[in-house]
Amino acid sequence: MSDSVTPLFLDGPNGRLFALHFAAPQARAHIVYLPPFCEEMNRCRHLAAAQARRFAAAGYSCLLLDLYGTGDSEGELAQASWSAWHEDARAAVAWCRGRQDLPVFLWGLRLGASLALDVIAATPRDFAGAILWQPVTTGKTFFTQVLRARIAYLSGAGLPPETSDEIRARLAQGEQVEVAGYLLGGALAADIDAFKLDSLQGLDGVNVHWLQQTSRAAEGPGGAVQKVVQRLEEGGARVQVSLFQAPQLWQLSERADGQPLLDATARLELC
C-alpha cells in the first residue's frame, strides 16, 4: 500500500471502525465514503479504492469507511442499525475535521448512498454536498431483493421454502436470519424496509451529485428515478443527475469495467 494510503481504526460510538485514508497534498475538502450492503460492498471495494485515489489526486482527502458490523470494523451485522450507522458516519466526519477543518462531502454507493443523503438531511449545514452512486430509492424493494438470495438457497437445497414476508416476520420477532452468508437482525431490517429516499426532508440548498447507471447510450434515467429527483428538488435540493453506461457493477461476481463510472465522477464540479 502506498505511503498516501493509510489503513486505520477510528473510535466509533459503538466500536472501532476500520477505514482507509487516501491523503491529498494541499487538500481542499474531505470526502467520506459509505459502502453498499453485504456482498455489494465486497464486489465494489476495488472500485471505491480506484475512485478514492482519483479523488486524492484531484485534491480531495478521502476516507473509505467500514460501518459497524461490516468489513473489518468491530461488531456484528445482526446488531447494527440505521441510527448506529448515522453515528459511524459522523465519527468519520469528525476524524477528518480533526485532521483539517475543511468542507466535507459524503459519498456512497447503493444503500451507502441512501445513508449518506439521510445523514446530510439531519444536519445539512455540516456538509458541502453528496455524491451518490446508484442510490437505493426504496428500502423495502431493495431488501426484498436481498431476501431473494435466501429464498433461492432454500429452494436449491431442498429445504422448506420461505417467502419474504415470512422471513421479515421472523426478523420482527427477534430472530437472526442468515442470508447469503450474512446474519441479519430485525432492527436493521426494519430500518431498511422503512427507508424512502423521496421522503427525506431538510435538504434545502444541498448539492446532490447523482450518478445513475444506464445500459444503452442516449437512454435517460427511469421514471422512478425521475420522480424521486423531482421530489428532492421540490424540497429544495439541487440535484444533478449524470448517467454512466456500464453493467450493474455491484451485482457482478467478476470485476467489470468501472471506467465509465470513474470518468463520470471525474467530470463532477465539486469545489
Image (spheres, rainbow, N blue to C red):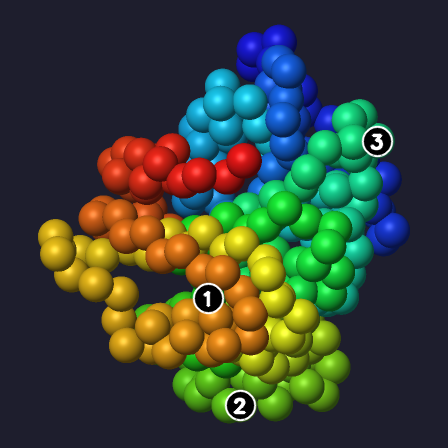
Q: Are marks 3 and 1 in contact (CB under 8 Å)?
A: no
Quickly name the residue at label 2.
166
Q: To which residue does mark 3 refer?
A: 98
Disc on the earlier residue, 2 or 1: 1
What residue is drawn where x is 37% and y is 52%? 211
The residue at 44%/39% (across/down) is: 269
Label 1: state its secondary structure: loop
Pinpoint residue 105: horizontal percent, then vertical percent.
Answer: 61, 44
On screen, residue 227 above or below 179: below
Residue 158 showing in the rendered view: no
Residue at horizontal 62%, vertical 13%?
Answer: 25
Is residue 253 or residue 228 the one in the foreground? Answer: 228
Q: Position of residue 153 (x, y in %)?
A: 40, 70
- Res. 115 image quadrant: bottom right
Q: Amino acid at mark 2?
A: Glu
Give the answer, above or below, for where 111 lies relative to 194.
above
